[in-house]
Amino acid sequence: MFPMKKILLDLLDDRSTMYAMDKRDARSEIITAGIHLFAVQGFNGTGLDAVLKKAGVPKGSFYYYFENKEDFGLAVIDRFAERYDRRLASALTEPDLSPLDRIRRHLEGALERFEHANCSKGCLIGNLSQEMADLNERFRHRLEEVFTGWQNRFAVCLGEAQARGEIAGDLDPEATAEFLLSGWEGALLRAKVMKSPRPLREFLRILFDRVLKPGPHGNADQI
């Protein structure tokens, strides 16, 4: 191959790679902007112009990456759920903590972040569930999948806590995980309305003082 021809081909390969990277980055920036804006304004309250302005992407670019706003909204849910699921998986499998301490630290960390955000935003998945579950079946189905995935992770951790004698043997880990997730999301909604972390703190107090405690023959030190 002539040297000049090889140079031209290399340049074209480099440009193709850079173009592909630019496409991925632009799509990612649009989704990230959607996460931030949906958390504050909701899905229906967020216009595409605001998303593209925040992302710093030209207006004509949106439909190159997404078929419509619904497709974009589902991509936002997927990105948020993927990131949060990684965080949850890491928190609930921390080997240096007992199962209950993993759950407690995870929820207390979420409470601290909520307070730091001036008791606003809350959970994006919870927010979109309240807004979209009755309006869009694709959203409802995807949001339920996300919640079910989180519930399953809590159930596994609670099952481990039960095996160690940290919680009563007659508790159903799956049902308890559903109660935990539903109670937390409900307390989060109430805390947003009150602009106060008190509902979350009360939920945690009752959860750990009354629900997640050893049975009469429990042994929290059991391995």
Image (cartoon, helix red, strand yellow):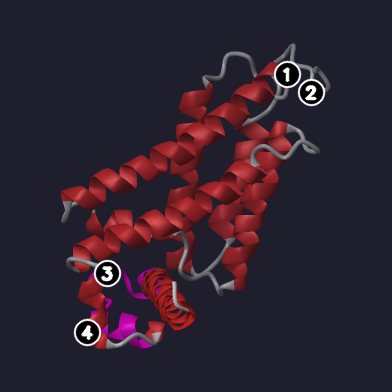
Give the number of the mark in front: 3 or 2.
3
Residue shown at 65%/19% (left/top)? 168
Looking at the picture, tell me which residue is in the foreground, 79 or 177.
Answer: 79
Query: How far separated are the C-alphas under marks 1 and 2?
Result: 5 Å
Q: Which residue in the protein does label 3 denote? A: 65
* Location of the N terminus (image quadrant): bottom left
Disc 1 residue type (three-letter): Gly
Q: Residue 29 location, x and y as percent? A: 42, 75
Q: What type is the residue that disc 2 sits on?
A: Ala
- Estimate the spatial distance between the alpha carbons at disc 1 and disc 4, rounded to whole Å: 58 Å
In the image, is residue 185 above or below residue 165?
Answer: below
Q: From which residue to which does the magenta span run?
A: 36-53
User: In the image, what residue type sits under mark 3?
Assistant: Tyr
| Residue at (45% x, 83% y) in the render | 4
Q: Secondary structure at mark 1?
A: loop
* Residue 203 visible at all: no
Compare marks 3 and 4 and give the one earlier in the sequence: 4
Of the two numbered discs 1 and 4 on the same chain, state the one appearing first in sequence: 4
Q: Is residue 49 on the magenta stretch?
A: yes
**In the rendered image, which residue does mark 4 sit on?**
60
Say if mark 1 contacts mark 2, CB within 8 Å: yes
